[in-house]
Amino acid sequence: MASSELWAIDYEIYGEVQGVFFRKYTEEQGRKLGLVGWVKNTASGTVTGQVQGPKEKVEIMKNWLRSVGSPMSRIDQAVFSNERQITVLEFQSFTTKY
Protein backbone atom coordinates (compact mmCIF):
# COMPACT_ATOMS: atom_id res chain seq x y z
CA MET A 1 0.00 0.00 0.00
CA ALA A 2 1.76 3.13 -1.27
CA SER A 3 0.00 5.52 1.12
CA SER A 4 1.82 4.00 4.10
CA GLU A 5 5.21 5.21 2.83
CA LEU A 6 6.84 7.54 5.34
CA TRP A 7 8.73 10.61 4.16
CA ALA A 8 10.88 13.24 5.80
CA ILE A 9 11.75 16.67 4.46
CA ASP A 10 13.69 19.65 5.75
CA TYR A 11 12.43 23.16 5.09
CA GLU A 12 13.44 26.80 5.42
CA ILE A 13 10.94 29.59 4.96
CA TYR A 14 12.00 33.12 3.96
CA GLY A 15 9.97 36.32 4.28
CA GLU A 16 8.21 37.96 7.19
CA VAL A 17 7.92 34.79 9.24
CA GLN A 18 9.21 35.76 12.70
CA GLY A 19 7.07 37.58 15.25
CA VAL A 20 3.89 36.65 13.34
CA PHE A 21 3.04 33.33 15.07
CA PHE A 22 4.45 31.33 12.13
CA ARG A 23 5.89 28.64 14.41
CA LYS A 24 2.64 28.30 16.37
CA TYR A 25 0.57 27.88 13.20
CA THR A 26 3.12 25.51 11.68
CA GLU A 27 3.02 23.31 14.79
CA GLU A 28 -0.81 23.33 14.76
CA GLN A 29 -0.98 22.49 11.05
CA GLY A 30 1.54 19.66 11.45
CA ARG A 31 -0.42 18.17 14.32
CA LYS A 32 -3.73 18.59 12.45
CA LEU A 33 -2.30 16.57 9.56
CA GLY A 34 -0.95 13.92 11.95
CA LEU A 35 2.68 14.73 11.11
CA VAL A 36 5.69 14.84 13.42
CA GLY A 37 8.72 17.08 13.34
CA TRP A 38 9.81 20.48 14.54
CA VAL A 39 9.94 24.19 13.71
CA LYS A 40 12.22 26.97 14.95
CA ASN A 41 13.34 30.52 14.24
CA THR A 42 16.86 31.07 12.91
CA ALA A 43 19.26 33.90 13.70
CA SER A 44 19.04 35.02 10.05
CA GLY A 45 15.29 35.73 10.27
CA THR A 46 13.99 32.59 8.62
CA VAL A 47 12.00 29.67 10.01
CA THR A 48 13.44 26.18 9.60
CA GLY A 49 12.39 22.67 10.54
CA GLN A 50 11.61 19.13 9.52
CA VAL A 51 8.37 17.31 8.74
CA GLN A 52 7.85 13.53 8.82
CA GLY A 53 4.84 11.39 8.01
CA PRO A 54 2.87 9.78 5.17
CA LYS A 55 3.98 11.15 1.79
CA GLU A 56 0.58 12.63 0.87
CA LYS A 57 0.36 14.48 4.20
CA VAL A 58 3.93 15.77 3.82
CA GLU A 59 2.95 17.14 0.38
CA ILE A 60 -0.04 18.95 1.92
CA MET A 61 2.26 20.44 4.56
CA LYS A 62 4.78 21.53 1.92
CA ASN A 63 2.03 23.38 0.07
CA TRP A 64 0.85 24.98 3.33
CA LEU A 65 4.40 26.12 4.18
CA ARG A 66 4.87 27.47 0.65
CA SER A 67 1.61 29.39 0.34
CA VAL A 68 -0.39 29.73 3.60
CA GLY A 69 1.64 30.10 6.80
CA SER A 70 0.25 32.22 9.61
CA PRO A 71 -2.34 34.96 8.91
CA MET A 72 0.17 37.79 9.51
CA SER A 73 3.12 36.20 7.70
CA ARG A 74 4.50 36.97 4.26
CA ILE A 75 6.20 34.01 2.59
CA ASP A 76 8.77 35.06 -0.01
CA GLN A 77 10.38 31.68 -0.57
CA ALA A 78 10.11 28.12 0.72
CA VAL A 79 13.15 25.91 0.27
CA PHE A 80 12.73 22.16 0.71
CA SER A 81 15.74 19.85 0.95
CA ASN A 82 16.87 16.39 1.99
CA GLU A 83 13.55 14.80 0.96
CA ARG A 84 13.81 11.11 1.68
CA GLN A 85 11.85 7.98 2.46
CA ILE A 86 12.18 6.77 6.05
CA THR A 87 11.21 3.49 7.69
CA VAL A 88 10.20 4.86 11.08
CA LEU A 89 9.20 8.26 12.47
CA GLU A 90 12.07 9.88 14.36
CA PHE A 91 9.90 12.19 16.50
CA GLN A 92 6.94 11.61 18.85
CA SER A 93 5.03 14.77 17.96
CA PHE A 94 5.31 18.16 16.27
CA THR A 95 7.14 20.66 18.46
CA THR A 96 8.61 24.14 18.48
CA LYS A 97 12.34 24.31 19.22
CA TYR A 98 13.87 27.33 20.93
Image: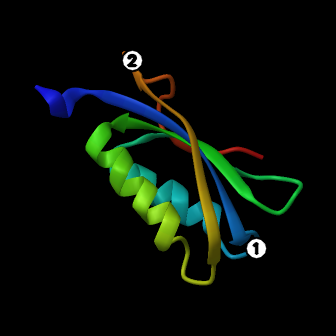
Q: Depth check: 39 or 1 in front? A: 1
Q: Is residue 53 above or below residue 29?
A: above
* Label 2 Cα crowd, 10 Å radius (few <14 / some 14-19 / many 20+): few
The amino acid on which the numbered mark 1 sits, given as a three-letter code, is Gly
Residue plotted at (31% across, 39% down): 55
In the displayed image of the protein, which residue is found farthest to the top? Answer: 87
Q: Residue 88 carries which label?
A: 2
Which x, y percent locates residue 41?
Answer: 76, 55
Judge whether residue 38 can be spotted in this image: no
Image coordinates of residue 4 in percent, x first then y, are 21, 28
Q: In this view, does 35 lie to the left or right of 47?
A: left
- Furthest-bottom residue in view? 72
Q: What element carries label 2?
A: loop
Residue shown at the point (53%, 70%) measured from the top left: 69
Locate residue 50: give its quadrant: top right
Instruction: Indicate the quadrant where residue 21 lies.
Output: bottom right
Secondary structure under tag 1 reads: loop
Taking 72 as reference, is 98 left or right? right
Crowding around mark 1 (Cα neighbors within 10 Å: few <14, some 14 to 19, many 20+) is few
Residue assigned mark 1: 19
Residue 92 badge: none
The residue positioned 41% from the left and 50% from the top of the image is 31
Quadrant location of the N terminus?
top left
Q: What residue type is labelled 2?
A: Val
> Which comes before the other along the chain, label 1 or label 2?
1
Q: Position of residue 43 (x, y in %)?
A: 89, 54
Residue lying farthest to the right in this orientation? 43
Residue 93: percent from left, percent from top:
47, 37
Q: Nearer the viewer, residue 88 or 66?
A: 66
